[in-house]
C-alpha cells in the first residue's frame, strides 16, 4: 500500500513539475508517450483485468454493467476535464470568473478520476495476484505522468501564480494515494464487501477502456496511416503481455 501510494504521488508530481520547467510544452512531444501508455493500459485491461473480473464473479451480467457504467462515467468526467486525464492540452482563455470555475471543475473531476484509480490498486488479492500488480501499477503511472503534464499546462492558463499551480498539482497528486488508502480500509472496516470491491474494479476498468481508446482516436484525428504510432502501440501492447507472462 505504501509503495503504491508513493509511486503514484511521485509520478504525478514529476509530470507536473516537468511542465513547469518547460515553458513551451508541445503536444507532439507528449503524443508518443501517450500512445505507448494508452496501448499498455488497454492491453493490461484486456488481458488481465477483464478476464479475472469475469472469472472472479458469478454474475457476469453485473460485471458487464459496471464496466459500461465506468466507461460512460468517464465520458461525463471529460465534460469537465476536456480530456486532460489522457493528455489533451488544447486550452482557451476565459474571463476571470469563468476561468476560476473551469479550474475548480477541472480539479474536482480529475481528483475523482485519480481517486478511483487508486482504489483498484488497494486489494491485489481481490482481482489480481500480487506478482502481476506491478504491471497494472506501471500502466497507471504511464498514464498519470502525461496527465499531470497536461494538467499543469491547462492550469497555467487559468492561474497566474505558480504557488496556486503547485498547490493544485499537490492536490491532484494526493488523490490517487488517498484512493489506495481508502480502498485498503473499506473492506476491513465493513464499509465495502468483497463483491462490492470487485464491482468497483469493474467500474474503473470501464474508465481505463475509455481513456486508452480515446488516446488512440485523438492521436490520429484525421485517421491517417501512421507507422510510428503503430510501432509504438505494438511495443506498449507487447510489454503489457510480457509483463503478465514473466513479471
Image: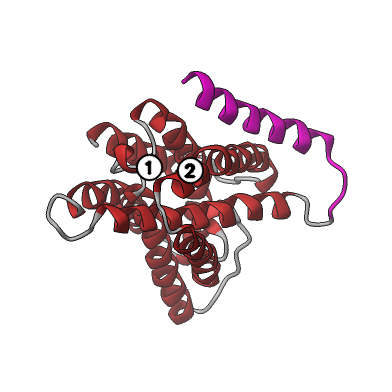
Q: Which residue is mark 2?
A: 49
What is the distance, in whole Å, between disc 2 and disc 1 at their CAs?
Answer: 7 Å
Measuring from the top left, give residue 237's x and y in whole percent.
64, 33
**Residue 239 placement, left or right of 190:** right
Answer whether residue 167 is visible to the viewer in this image: no
Total marks in image: 2
Q: Position of residue 33 (x, y in %)?
A: 61, 37
Image quarter for residue 31? top right
**Comes first in the chain, label 2 or label 1:** 2
Name which residue lies at 67% across and 37% down: 32
Q: Which residue is mark 1?
A: 127
Vertical comparison of 157 with 240: above or below = below
Residue 64, compared with residue 128, is above or below; it is: below
Q: Residues within 10 Å of mark 1 (few under 14, many from 20)?
A: many
Residues at badges 2 and 1 in contact (C-beta under 8 Å)?
Answer: yes
Give the residue displayed 31% in from the left and 36% down from the top. 4
Q: Which residues are magenta?
A: 223-247
Q: Residue at x 37, y 57 (%)?
A: 200
**Residue 230 is covered by the magenta coloring:** yes
Vertical placement of 1 versus 162: above or below? above
Q: Residues within 10 Å of mark 2 (few under 14, many from 20)?
A: many
| Image quadrant where one finds the N terminus | top left
For residue 122: magenta? no
Q: Is residue 2 above or below residue 153?
A: above
**Secondary structure beneath disc 2?**
helix
Amino acid at each position: 500500500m505504501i509503495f503504491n501510494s508513493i509511486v503514484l504521488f511521485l509520478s504525478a508530481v514529476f509530470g507536473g513539475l516537468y511542465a513547469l520547467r518547460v515553458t513551451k510544452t508541445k503536444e507532439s512531444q507528449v503524443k508518443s508517450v501517450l500512445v505507448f501508455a494508452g496501448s499498455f493500459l488497454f492491453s493490461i485491461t484486456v488481458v488481465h483485468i477483464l478476464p479475472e473480473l469475469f472469472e472472479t464473479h458469478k454474475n457476469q451480467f453485473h460485471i458487464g454493467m459496471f464496466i459500461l457504467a465506468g466507461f460512460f462515467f468517464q465520458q461525463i468526467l471529460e465534460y469537465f476535464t476536456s480530456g486532460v486525464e489522457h493528455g489533451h492540452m488544447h486550452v482557451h482563455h476565459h474571463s476571470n470568473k469563468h476561468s476560476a470555475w473551469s479550474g475548480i471543475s477541472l480539479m474536482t473531476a480529475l481528483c475523482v478520476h485519480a481517486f478511483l484509480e487508486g482504489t483498484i490498486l488497494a486489494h491485489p488479492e481481490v482481482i489480481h495476484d500480487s506478482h502481476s500488480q506491478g504491471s497494472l501499477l506501471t500502466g497507471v503511472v504511464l498514464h498519470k505522468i502525461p496527465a499531470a503534464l497536461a494538467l499543469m499546462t491547462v492550469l497555467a492558463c487559468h492561474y497566474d501564480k505558480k504557488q496556486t499551480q503547485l498547490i493544485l498539482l499537490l492536490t491532484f497528486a494526493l488523490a490517487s494515494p488517498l484512493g489506495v488508502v481508502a480502498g485498503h480500509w473499506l473492506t476491513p472496516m465493513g464499509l465495502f464487501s468483497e463483491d462490492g470491491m470487485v464491482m468497483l474494479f469493474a467500474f474503473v476498468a470501464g474508465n481505463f477502456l475509455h481513456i486508452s481508446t480515446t488516446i488512440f482516436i485523438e492521436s490520429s484525428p484525421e485517421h491517417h496511416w501512421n507507422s510510428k504510432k503503430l510501432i509504438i502501440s505494438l511495443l506498449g501492447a507487447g510489454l503489457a503481455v510480457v509483463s503478465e507472462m514473466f513479471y
